[in-house]
Image (cartoon, rainbow, N blue to C red):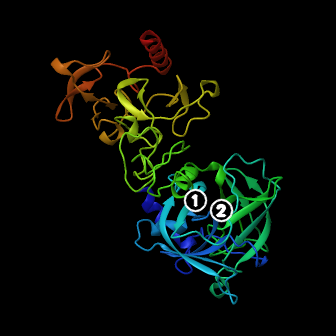
Amino acid sequence: MRRLLGLALIAGCAPSGPDTGARAAAIVGGSDDLGDPAVARLELVGGACTGALIAPTVILTAAHCAAPAVGAAAPGTASFGPGGATGFTESIPITTVWIARDWPRADADVALVRLAHAAAAAPVRWQLTALPAMTGATVRVVGFGETAGGALATAGTKRTVALTVRTDGAMLVTGDATHNTCQGDSGGPVFADLGDGEIVVAVVANGDPGCAGDARFARLDRQRLVDVALAAWDGPCAADGACASGCATIDPDCDACGFGGVCASACPAIDLDCPLGAGPGDDCAAAPACESRVCVTAPDDATVHLCSAPCDPANAGADCPAPLGACVLGACVYAGATPGVLGAACEAPGDCRGGLCDTRQHVCAVPCGPDATCPDGFACGPVENGQACTLPEGSCQAGGATSWPLALALLALARRRRR
C-alpha cells in the first residue's frame, strides 16, 4: 500500500501530466552549469529527473522519480554533461533501483539507481551524519529542470542556483518567486559547505506547483539504510560474485541476508530485498515481522505482541516513533492503554486486535481458554455468536484490562524476578 501511495506523487518528476499540487522542483533564477560533472539527467520509467553520482556505479536521486522503475527490465538511462544545445558526453543504462523504505513519507524521498558500468565522472561526497543547524545557510542546487513552471521546452539543460534555507526541520525548506527549483529538478543534489568544501546534504523532493513558493529537500542525515544499499552495490563488499571478509555490512555473496535480490527470513537485521515490515504499534508474531526487528509484549495484555523500537528510558519515550510514546525496559510501548487489547473500549470488531468486540458492554474480547478460563477480572460469556472472555455481567470496568501504572509495575517486577 505504501508503495502504491508513492506512485500518486510521481507527477512531480514527469515532464508532463496532471498537476498534483506538490510538483517537484526545476531551476528558476539560476545560471547554466558547465561544471558539476557528477550530476546527471535521469530518464526513468515515468519521467525525467536529476541525480548525483555518489559512487562509480551509483546515483542518488528522489524516490518519487525512481518508484515506477522498480522491477522494470530497463529502468532508464543516466546522461552526463551540460545537456541542452551542448548535449551529453556519456549515457549509461540503469540496471537496478532502490527506494528508501520509509517512502512515501515526504522526508524520505530518497532513492539510489545502479549503473551498468562505472561513469567517467568522479563521484561527489555526501553527508550521512547529523547536519549542523542549517537555518540561514546557503545551499546550491543543480538540476536539469525548467526555468519557469510549465515551460517544458526549457528543461534538459544543467543549471545551478544558490538558495537560503528558511527551515531546517524534517526537511530543508527554501525558495521564493525569483530563485527556486522547478519541474525536472527532482532528485537533484543540494550542496552545502560545512567547512571542508561542498558536500551533498539533501536531494530535491517537492515544491510549489508554480515554482515560486516553498521548495523542500529531503535531508540525507534523516535517512535509514542508504549506506547499506550503497555498500551492496559498490566497494569490496558489493554483490560482485566474490565473498569478502571483514565487511561493515553484509556481503550479499556471503549471506542471503545481504541486499542481493533474495529475501531471506529471520535475518538479524533488515534484508533490503524483503517487503516493508510492520510499523510501530502493529501486531507481530516475531521480530522479523517488524520493520524495526523489535517485537514486544504489550504491558497491559500478555496475549498481544506489537512492533516496537529501542529507546532510552532517560528520555521518557520522547525518542519513540509514533504512535508509541513510552519507554519500558528499553523498548517503546503505548503511553497509555494499548489500543484494541482485552478490555479496551470498542464500538465494532475492527476496534479490537483480535476482531472481537462485546457490543453489549463495548469492550474488546478474546476467545476463552481451555475449560472456559479467562484472565483475572474477566469471565467467559456470550460475545457475537460464540463464547469469549469479556467483562463479567454488571462490571463497571472498561477501557483496559489493567490500569497503566499497575501494568508497568507488574511488568517490571516480573522481568526482575526472571533475571
Reading the image, the residue beneath label 1 is: 109
Q: Is residue 287 left or right of residue 134?
A: left
Give the residue drawn at x 62%, y 66%.
Answer: 187
Secondary structure under the numbered disc 2 in the rendered image: strand
Please determine whether, in this image, residue 290 is positioned above or below residue 87: above
Please determine whether, in this image, residue 209 is positioned above or below residue 262: below
Reading the image, the residue beneath label 2 is: 203
- Residue 114, given in percent of the width and then of the height, sits at 52, 65
Q: CA distance from mark 2 to mark 1?
A: 8 Å
Q: Are marks 2 and 1 in contact (CB under 8 Å)?
A: yes
Give the residue drawn at x 70%, y 81%.
Answer: 82
- Residue 205 in view: no
- Residue 122, given in percent of the width and then of the height, sits at 68, 67
- Residue 223 in view: yes
Badge number at residue 37? none
Q: Is residue 247 left or right of residue 185?
A: left
